[in-house]
Amino acid sequence: MLKSLLDMLGNRPEQHNSIFLLARWTFVVAFAATLCPAATALRSTHFALYSGGLTAKQAESSLSRLELLRAALIELHGDSWVPSAPVTIFVPASEKQWHRLAGNSAEQGYFRSGSRRHWIVVNPMAPFFDDVLSHEYVHAVLHQALPNLPTWFEEGICEYYSTLELEHKSGKSELLLGRPPTRRLRQLRGVMQIELAALSRARLDVDSYALAWAATYVLWPSWQPGQDFPARIPVGPFPLRRRPSLLSPRTTELHALPAVAVREIEAALAASFPLLALPAADNAEQEFLSGSRLLDSGQPAAALALLESACRQRPSQSTWWLTLAFAYRELGRLSDARQTIERARSTAVNQTERDAAGALANSLGPP
């Protein structure tokens, strides 16, 4: 449908985008409007962020943090230390929404891999929000750079880099590494050594995360793939580590995501996180969405009955009439297409919809 509409409109993107987005994504927009009623949608050079739970200022700070962490990991470990797919950060609109997605009540964020897109999802009310965000980003990197690590060690490396900082003084930069995550130090009081076999068997909780961080501090970054782990690791002390860096503080260039990209993220959210499912669309919306999908896949005959039924139930939807007219056109029923275009004109609520109806009418040629 997308290519055909482009052809039909004479490759006029300002008209095509209005038809395609208004019609095809009606259901998805309804999903997202309830999911994140006042969403912030931004992109930086390497990340996209969609949130109903952060202000624009918080979102900007988070994206700047991720860009710094990405550059620092590449400087420390080389170009292979990047995710295998683009990363999108999703911050739900509320803590209640977050708890629909969380694996357990203590979890504050998680990473989900995908072939076309990786997701980082974070509780908007997470204490130490940027540390949690950074931790999950390192999961995305390790998924590509060091797969199949023991769980405790992967979590420990993520903790290790979650507190990375860049210090710039007198024209020189240093990376500050190994700062103990504040939320972990309490669990290490009185612990003298860590039995790695016991840690490998332990359920991941607040205590085991603290032990994983402390063990990793000793082992990392000298450990190499294939190297055996010691049976026991002493705990502490944890002095801050400084590494010379070529990085310098700079402003992260940020942009609002264009409408098309926002719609794509909203559609991916609807497909990727069924636990966020909202009340089902009514029958008309379901039929329109199903008909549109069939039309998109080149099956106008199969789409026709669904689109006709949807338009009868919602006769005020200009974009729905226009989609039905397009189906008639694809089937060679030009007289029906013209009559349906007139319904689209009569119900249009703005000039864009009227122009789209006119463009489709012109594509049919003279009566």
Image (cartoon, rainbow, N blue to C red):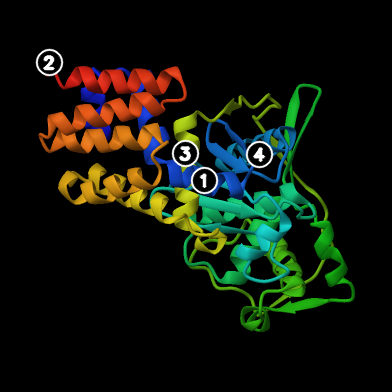
Query: Amino acid under label 2?
Result: Pro
Secondary structure beneath disc 2?
loop
Cα distance in 3D space between marks 1 and 2: 38 Å
- Determine which residue is flagged by label 3: 263
Query: Amino acid under label 1?
Result: Ala
Secondary structure beneath disc 1?
helix
Mark 4 / mark 1, whichever is N-terminal: 1
Please state, as top left, top right, bottom left or bottom right, where the C terminus lies in the image.
top left
Position above or below: 176 against 260: below
Kindly report which numbered mark, 2 or 4, lies closer to the viewer in this rendering: 2
Q: Residue at x 34, y 45 (%)?
A: 312
Mark 3 / mark 1, whichever is N-terminal: 1
Q: Residue at x 84, y 62 (%)?
A: 237
Instruction: Assess disc 3: are there few (<14), some (14-19) or many (≥20) residues with their C-alpha within 10 Å of its C-alpha.
Output: some
- Determine which residue is flagged by label 2: 366
Residue 104 quadrant: bottom right
- Determine which residue is flagged by label 4: 38
Rendered location of residue 258, percent (x, y): 50, 28
Do the residues under discs 2 and 3 have CB atoms within 8 angstroms? no
